Amino acid sequence: MRKHIKLKIKGISLAILAIVVISFTEAIYGQISITGKIVDEMNVPIPYANVGIFKEGIGTVSNRKGDFELNIPEELLDYNISISHVGFEPLSFKVKEIPQNIELKRALIKLDVVTISASEIKEKEIGSRSKAGLLISGFSYKDLGGEVGRKFSIKQTSIIERIGFHVKYNSFDSIILRLNIYSIEKRLPGQLLSGNNFITISDQKTGQMEYILRDLFEVHEDVIVTIELVEHFPLETGYIYFSQVPPYLGKMYYRETSFDKIKKYIGGPMSMYLMIKF
């Protein structure tokens, strides 16, 4: 994932550097390939589960058949590898002991009933629709499980109804993104509040995108919303980049891959907005 890019040539230079570093690491330390399938209690595949080693920058996402593959340096064989998906209880195994078939059990989730009185509804847009594009953030085809996002200030208890963002460049024939909504803890994303909304973009589409959330979602305080890469075609090439907006002293939040640290940097928030009702 590239944090921000001013010129295409800079992005190319970064990509070449990444290839050199990865090759050097493999030559010295060696890596092992971990493969597996993630299923539920009825042996039904679980797509788009997060798989990775906590804060080590090593992770991926299972495909729509529940299959995943992950290359891990040999010196991390005694580390724990974590598996999680919204609606299921997370699991963790030693890398060297991970089974081929991984069964996740469904978690009991208490859903709060959201009631809206039509006579009292107010609607407001927060965030930005800017197409500025001086800086961009996004993913290459290798960034499964990567996330980029921004903070939203919620002044009163609100219902998040729709989300929009601006795609500056997109070379994928089709791509699936997951919307994640987090509480804020110590100025970083904390608890995952919602992760069941998926966006499909096809035909290398760019421009302004807007989506209605599948479920009404109520928030009581500021949140961080991220977009996560969970699937793309073709598999071995491609990229998608989102616009960032002034002021460029604003904060962008990003995660390189599943279970890596979520970080922030000064470079302008994403061009993203929420439609809320209160």
Image (cartoon, rainbow, N blue to C red):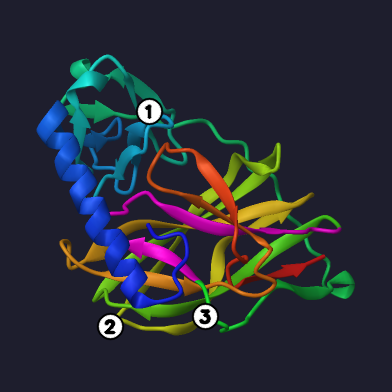
Residue tagged 2: 203
Q: Which residue is drawn at 30% across and 30% down?
A: 41
Separation of residues labelled 1 and 2 (CA atoms): 36 Å
Packing grade of label 3 (10 A; few <14, some 14-19, many >=20) is many
- Give how far across and how far down residue 211 sits, in percent: 53, 73
What residue would you read off at disc 1?
105
Please tell me whether mark 1 sits on a helix, a strand or a loop: loop
The part of the chain drawn in magenta is: 136-155
**Amino acid type at image mark 2:** Asp
Question: Which of pointers 1 and 2 lies earlier in the amino acid sequence?
Answer: 1
Which amino acid, by three-letter code, is at mark 3?
A: Gly
Quarter of the figure that contains the N terminus: bottom left
| Cβ–Cβ under 8 Å for marks 1 and 3 | no
- Left/right of residue 9 with respect to residue 90 in the rendered view: left
**Up-down: is 36 above or below 137?**
above
| Left or right of 90 in this view: 99 | left
For mark 3, give the secondary structure: loop
User: Residue 26 lies in magenta, yes or no?
Assistant: no
Report the residue at 30% width, 44% height from top. Answer: 60
Task: Between residue 154 and residue 122, name the one nearer to us.
Answer: 154
Q: Which of marks 1 and 3 is nearer the N terminus?
A: 1
Image coordinates of residue 98 in percent, x first then y, are 22, 21
Q: Callout 1, which amino acid?
A: Lys
Mark nearer the viewer, 1 or 2 = 2
